[in-house]
Each structure stands twice: as C-alpha cells, then as structure tokens.
Amino acid sequence: MRTTRVTVAALAAAAALTLTACGGETAKTGSVTQISGGQNGAKAATVLDRPFAKPELVLTDTNGKPWNLREQTKNKPTLIYFGYTHCPDVCPLTMSNIAVAKKALPKADQDNLQVVFVTTDPARDTPESLAPWLRSLDPAFTGLTGDFAAIQAAARSLGIGIEAATTGPDGKVVSMHGAQVIAFSPRTDEGYVLYGEGTTVDDYTKDLPKIIKGENP
C-alpha cells in the first residue's frame, strides 16, 4: 500500500480541529478525517505534498543554554514532537517508541538523527525537569523549553495545534496539544513526513532508515 499523501491545507485543518489531552481523551471542535496511523494495514507515514519550512525557533535546552532549531538541526534528519513531561500516556509512549526504534539503527545513523522534544508546558517543564525525563528515554534526545507564545507559534507553523496548560476541577494540570511527530529531511531541511499517535515502534523502525537519507518512507 502506498504511503498516504495529504495537502498542507488539509493537515492544518485537521490539526486545528483535533487536540489530544494526555490522559486518554481527545478534544474535537469538528469532524475530521484520519490522515495518519498504521491501522488496518495502512502505513503510518503521511508524506506531505508541500513540506513545512523549519520554524525559526530559539528556546532553552536542558543545559540552560539557547538552542536554535534551524542552526542546530541543519542538514540533519530530524524528528520534532510537541508534548509535556507530566503527560501520563501519549507523550512518553511516543518518545519511547522513537527511542526503541532509534536503537535499531547503525551507530552512525543514531548519532546523526536529531530527536527534538519541545514542551507545551514550559511553566513546569524547566531545563532541570526536562533533562532527567529525556535522559531516561535516550540521553541524546534534545529537550527545549521557553516562551509559550513562541512554542505555540512554531507548532502552528507546522500544522500542530497546542493550547496553554489549564487546571481542571480535580486540580490536575492538562496540556492540550497535537500528537503528531514531524520528520525533517536532511536534504531540504523541510518537514515532509508526519506520524500520528498511533505510530508503533515497528513503524518507526521500518521508516527511520529512509528518513535519515531524506527518502520517502
């Protein structure tokens, strides 16, 4: 079966309508068609007909230093995910799946692949709290935090909706965010492949060798 292709406009519309509340609930403001996920034999990868430009984003890494997304990942295969460390399910599972799949790569490819986790809850996800959370998954993963408005704007430029964290009646803080992972090509530095939250370890294991080369999965 061929890899799914969608237009950027369709992707942006879907992302604007669907946000994930880590904890197993999905908030929707409208009806959208599923555009990714490895269910029913379909490939998990969604190849975009018009790739996204890499956001101009400078945040703070887990060492407390400025980290320029464009400069630090230039000409490198890169996966970017927006989530938060207090998420009980979707975020840790997504990052764990990527970490496991990455270990199946040759050492040189592991070293070349950039995996960037951008928090959607910067008030709680400080450099000090991000560091051990990511280290438990893969010490080479990059964690970024900083100004929420800048993070939100960068996510939206990639068709991913996020909202400021809120506190519910039960006192729990919830961060609503799109659960997509976007892969950027080392050839063009553009985001050209999207993965939904249903993507498995096997999906990433099959696709990462091609992502690293800038090829379509």
Image (spheres, rainbow, N blue to C red):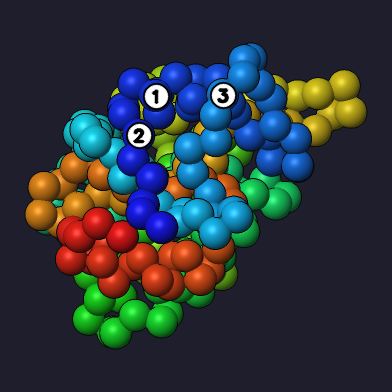
**Left or right: 19, with 138 as reference point:** right
The residue labelled by disc 1 is 10
Q: Position of residue 70 (x, y in %)?
A: 18, 43
User: At 15% across and 46% down in the image, what residue appears?
Assistant: 189
Q: Position of residue 167 (x, y in %)?
A: 75, 24
The residue labelled by disc 2 is 6
Can residue 123 be seen from the camera position used here? no
Residue 65 numbered mark, or none: none
User: At 40% across and 71% down in the image, what residue appears?
Assistant: 206
Q: CA distance from mark 2 to mark 3?
A: 13 Å
The image shows residue 41, relative to residue 209, as above or below, that is: above
Q: Which of these two is toward me, 21 or 117?
A: 21
Judge the density around disc 1: few (<14), some (14-19), many (≥20) Cα neighbours within 10 Å: some
**Left or right: 209, with 125 as reference point:** left
Which residue is at the far bottom? 106
* SS of the residue under disc 2: strand
The residue labelled by disc 3 is 32
* SS of the residue under disc 1: helix
User: At 28% across and 84% down in the image, what residue appears?
Assistant: 107
Q: Position of residue 62 (x, y in %)?
A: 41, 54
